[in-house]
Amino acid sequence: MSERPDHSATEPGQPFRKEGKLIVISLRTGRLANRLTLFAHFIAMAEEQGHHLINFAFHSYAHLFETTRRDIYCRYPVAERRSWLDVVPGVAAALRKTRICYQIVCYASIWNERFPIFGKQVVTLREKPGSYIIPLDGPEVQAQIRDAWIVFAHGWPFRVPTDWIQRHAGKIRAYFRPIEEYARASREAVDRLRRDADIVVGVHIRHGDYRAWQGGKYFFPAARYAGWMQELAAQFPDCKVAFFVCSDEPRTAGEFPGLSVGLGAGSPVGDLYALAGCDYIFGPQSTFTQWASFHGNKPLFLLNDANARLERAKFRISCLDVCV
């Protein structure tokens, strides 16, 4: 890998740093946590190598975060000045609703790959069938983008080294600060449990699509989660343990007999950041719990099968490195 570039100031009129590239994320990948995860990896790359990002693929969730709700381009780093598209009332909202910006860059990335009329100045990084991980710091990617001014990133499994994520974790967390409505709901959901507990454990129960995904490998009934919760509570013998339970299906406290339980924060982003506010987190393999662990800097245990044993010593803070 080449030396990290000198992050000197951008010259007037240039769209990005002189030595950097404009990276355009051009494919929507899954739901909220997937898009946060992919965005975070490119932010770490931008910090390491001096690039700028545009992410129209984040429009579906841009209104949930303080930075992206003000910027139609969903840029990183945060722009010093707002675009006129954001200033004129109604324009940005209309563009997000129609998805026209996303459609343009999505098809532009595909057509650029098929008909590279700009040569090496504009390139498309695209995942290949069967790809598991595409290392953005790897020699293949770095050679492909070396001479480019604009890079379209069209795919899901693009990843940077974990030390890049760790080195720039503070900036990534700050960038994805939810708007106050959801931040407050998340805090209140956890604070209610803290009044009578020493430790709050976040539990993510994902049913919905997990009934069928990978043959139901990560689908566990509520009763099994209740067993895991009892198992973990027993590992804190001198503490009162409460559980914040969020799920993509309605749940009741009666499904978790003998446990102190709080249910949901009222929205997916509220649940996500409430999990981040807990002391420990566990759930099935998912970017949802990984993001909560990373953003809250809280230890996580990913459940791989119904026979897994929760051991307090095996919880680890996520670096967004498990690709699912």
Image: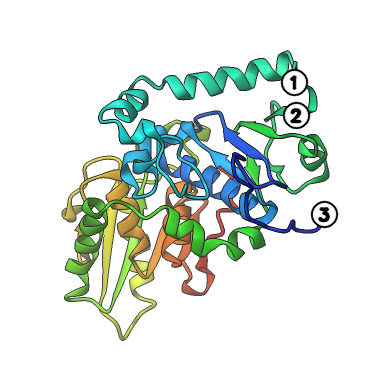
Residue at horizontal 44%, vertical 44%? 33
Looking at the image, residue 188 lies above or below residue 29: below
Q: Is residue 172 above or below residue 280?
A: above
Q: Residue at x 46, y 73 (%)?
A: 312
Residue at x-position 45% and y-position 53%: 291
Residue that numbered label 1 is attached to: 118
Viewer-side label of 2, 3 = 2
Q: Mark 2 highlights which residue?
A: 121
Query: Residue 324 has which mark?
Result: none
Determine contact: label 2, label 3, CB under 8 Å: no
Which mark sits nearer the N-terminus, 3 or 1?
3
Q: Where residue 97 appears, x then y in whole percent?
A: 32, 24
| Mark 3 and mark 1 residues within 8 Å of each other at the beta carbon | no
- Local secondary structure at mark 2: helix
Instruction: Check the image and name the residue furthest to the front.
Output: 12
The N terminus: image quadrant: bottom right
Q: Are discs 2 and 1 less than 8 Å apart at CB? A: yes
> Considering the numbered disc 3 on the image, is that residue within a helix, a strand or a loop?
loop
Residue 181 in the image, given as x and y percentages of width and height: 21, 51
